[in-house]
Image: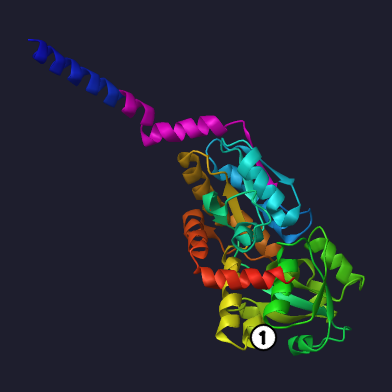
Amino acid sequence: MLVEMSRKLGLIIGHCALAAVMASVGSPVQAQENLEQFYKGRTINLIIGSAPGGGYDLYGRMIARYIGKHIAGNPLVVPNNMPGAASNVAAGYVYNVAPKDGTVMGALYMGSVVDPLFSDSRPTHDPTQFNYIGNANADVYVCLVRADANVKSFEDLFSKELIVGGSAIGASTHDFPALLNAVLGTKFKIVAGYPGTREISFAIDKNEVQGGCGNTWSSISSSQRDWFTSGKVKVLAQEDATGYPELNALHIPRTLDFAKTDEQRQMLELYYSQTAFGRPYVMAPQVDPAKIKLMRKAFMDTMNDPELKAEAEKIKVDVIPIAGDVLQELVKKIYATPKNIVDKVRVALAQK
């Protein structure tokens, strides 16, 4: 009798537990309604890890104007600039400080994603643990020079010095030319400390510096188109594995074309692999997976929004998005690179 009662009691408890679990999970429709209820009337802060006016800021503000209508509940999305340490300040804020409830998203430099792989100087975040929402554009980076500088071609950089503007260590405008100096033997003289690409562009305009290296072609060709139509500034080389079709058609060389050994090529290819996610958008590791799924879909819907595409075409910027789950796997792949190749790049960057 006692055994039979225990068995029945166990069945009752089991059914109750299952019902509780099912109630907590809810149906997909209920989950969508809950998310819509959560985001309705709320504000999502988009933390842009660069100074106002540059390419990252341009993309971030454009996305902020449209993504709210693709998120359940249609929250207000407000862009806020948090420059510093090549976007690592913003990355650290999203990772460690900001609310983890799905109301904060970071728009980061790609350098803040790979910097911990190549440097131990900023242990503020673990890029492999971020939730990647998506990537706005796969960028091609270029080296630029004023037409009145002594350097007329990339080959000249092996015998002549070129003064270029750069941001902080970890930013492409600093690390890309530094790596070329260490690996290929170029003679870039980097004047570091500019807050962002807009300030570097001002410096080039004023002849305060003679050029830049590690600038994104999609941004610079839009914001400074008159440079290239007037001939005031020209592109020396592309810092990319395959190059940009428009620049390839103009026979602009790739820096990889100047690698003399397989080791040099491997080092540059590893470092340039980060350009596949030139404009990553992230949320903290602790954000609810259901919200991450919602945000990833909203991001891709935004990038395919006809109004956003029309604006991007009007201001002459490329929109070549990468889905968040794909981006997540790309980051994992880069962090799985054989240690000997990573160490060689680390040594090269340490010489900057």
Snapshot colouring: rainbow
Q: Position of residue 224 (x, y in %)?
A: 80, 69
Q: Which residue is mark 1?
A: 253
Residue at 60 percent of width and 67 percent of height:
275
Nearest the viewer among 227 and 178 is: 178
Q: Is residue 305 above or below residue 221?
A: above
Nearest the viewer among 41 and 260 is: 260
Q: Which image quadrant: the N terminus?
A: top left
What type of secondary structure mainly makes up the magenta span?
A: helix
What residue occupies the far left of the structure in this picture? 1
Q: Is residue 54 above or below residue 98?
A: below
Bounds of the magenta span? Answer: 20-48
Instruction: Left or right? Give the position of 222 relative to 189.
Output: left
Q: Position of residue 327 (x, y in %)?
A: 51, 58
Locate residue 351: give its quadrant: bottom right
Q: Which image quadrant: the C terminus?
A: bottom right
Q: Position of residue 219 (x, y in %)?
A: 72, 66
What residue occupies the far top of the structure in this picture? 1
Residue at 53 percent of width and 49 percent of height:
129
- Amino acid found under the numbered disc labelled 1: Pro
Residue 305 visible in the picture: no
Residue at 61 percent of width and 78 percent of height:
243
Q: Position of residue 73 (x, y in %)?
A: 55, 35
Q: Is residue 130 above or below residue 238?
A: above
Nearest the viewer among 137 and 342 is: 342
Instruction: Left or right? Give the position of 339 relative to 201.
Output: left
Q: Is residue 33 magenta?
A: yes
Residue at 49 percent of width and 34 percent of height:
35
